[in-house]
Amino acid sequence: MAEGVRPRVKAPGSAEAGEIVMIKTLISHKMESGQRRDSDGDLIPRSIINRFTCDFNGTNVLDVEMHGAISTNPYFEFDVKIPESGDLQFTWYDDDGSVYEEVKSVKV
Amino acid sequence: MNFKTLSVVAAVALAMPALGSADPDDDTLIINEEIEVATKVEPAEHLDGALYEVISGWHFRNDDTQAMEMDDFDNPAMLGAENGMAIWNTADGSEGKSCADCHGDAAESMKGVKATYPKFDEKAGTLMTVQMKVNECRTERMGAEAWSYDAGPAIDMEAMIGSQSRGMPMNVAIDGPAEPFWEKGKEIYYTRYGQLELSCASCHEENYGNMIRADHLSQGQTNGFPTYRLKNAKLNGAHSRFKGCIRDTRAETFNPGSDEFIALELYVASRGNGLGVESPSVRN
Amino acid sequence: MEFSRRDTLVLGAGAVALTSLPLRVAAAGEEEIDAFTGGADVAEGGVTLDAPEIAENGNTVPVSVSAEGATAIMVLALGNPNPDVATFNFGELSGSQSASTRIRLAGTQDVVAVAKMGDGSFAKTTKNVKVTIGGCGG
């Protein structure tokens, strides 16, 4: 696992049935793009989070394919429809195989 | 043309507006819809008329950058402050103590600290910055190793401590035992360094609001430090920023944690007395 | 990360080399758009792409995309060494077909958002973003 990677999610704790709520996510990650060179002129290998998903009770909300042009500490803002009480599941996939997860419960 | 004239020409060229007006805007800074921060204040008396208004660097940034600082979730600097809080609560060193073991809840015990530092420390008999105080605790009470100046954990801790004072007015003492340090800092502030022969004042007193290439020059206030720069996507300490500035004058610079930068930090902080603490801020 | 002056020069040299090739080369982003659309026609407009006219720093540029009725939106930065930025696939419980993120732009360039609509058609919007070069060590 890359060092110091910590996910953060901002989601409301409660909502009306069928309400659309805004979600913000931020994860600490340097997102090494693979385009930079070190002081010896050698390319620094790419090391990024390449995919982010959000599901609610197992049903998909958003699935993002990410490339090296996403900034350090990737940030996303999007809307979710909350049909019932349940869990929002957030998953980030690292190039190195690590998977970072976060869960937020929403009460209707 | 002698070298002096050349450097004056260079300085003028640097300060020439390139993209129209770069004057500070009139927006209001409220963090988390809760903390009001004074970003434009009357200059302190000791400025002796050098500035007619003291303005936070926040006003010199565009709306998108400003917005990032107005909500803790949108502010990537808070990642560092959060890490600082985790370190605060974690035991370290031979004594097996954490910061919290002695100082309890940082929200209480560290409130107001950033607003009054750097500060003369009676026991140490010298001027101390927040990072020096933290290292004093680490080495003398925790039996832990001192952190390098402006290194990752030190800057995260400083950001966390700073965030406990947000909205409080900067109010560093410059009299009594602090005075010689303040005088030394002031002398450095007005000394022209490097091949470009630029002092801090050349840019941040005489030319704030103008463009330096495509960038707005601010007053170089420290009320928001440590600051997350979009440019390098990390928290930056005031001393590291001083170093970057002096390097850009094409000079040999002082090092973070040096006596020169400790004195300069006090002097620059005193120029911002009255500004609300923003730490950790977001700049470009 | 940041692009140093040297990186930018290298990029520039690459661009010159490309334009001086005698054979026709695909315009930046064309390949990626074709892969996304399967070669289908792409209508202009119908996608909202919010990005600053002038970005304060190319390292962290806020962008938002939105297209009502879209199943996916792809974002490309045509002037980057690799134009791919992100593709947002909207699931059953997405509250709106919109999303915001922060991206890297290697310099002043066109940013493109291509939306795949629910009926299988495609739409795109292009926005030019000027990236300023910082004054101090930027």
Image: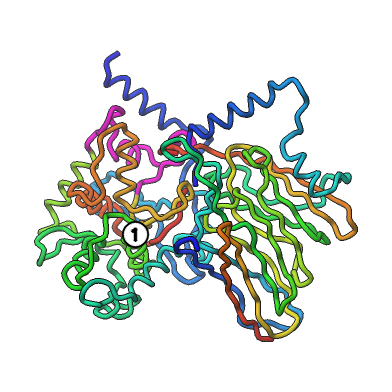
For the stretch drawn in magenta, what is the main secondary structure?
A: loop
Question: Magenta residues?
Answer: B191-220
Q: Residue B203 placed where, x, y %?
A: 35, 38
Q: Is residue C114 above or below residue A16?
A: above
- Residue pictured at 41% horizontal, 57% vertical: B39
> Looking at this view, is C115 or B273 the one in front?
C115
Q: Residue B279 placed where, x, y %?
A: 38, 61
For badge 1, the amino acid type reads Ile
Q: Report the residue marked by disc 1.
A: B155
Local crowd size for mark 1, using a 10 Å CA cut-off: few (<14), some (14–19), many (≥20): many
Is B158 within the magenta? Answer: no
- Residue pictured at 34% horizontal, 62% vertical: B153
Say whether residue B238 is left or right of residue B173: right
Q: Is residue A77 visible?
A: yes
Q: Is residue B176 visible?
A: no
Residue most toward the right? Answer: C119
> Looking at this view, is B55 or B185 the one in front?
B185
Quadrant including the C terminus of chain C: top left
Say whether residue B169 is left or right of residue A98: left
Is B193 within the magenta? Answer: yes
| SS for dot 1 | helix
Q: Residue B33 placed where, x, y %?
A: 51, 70
Q: Residue C80 placed where, x, y %?
A: 62, 40
- Residue pictured at 29% horizontal, 33% vertical: B198
| Mark 1 belongs to chain | B
- Residue pictured at 85% horizontal, 50% vertical: C122
Residue most toward the front? Answer: A97
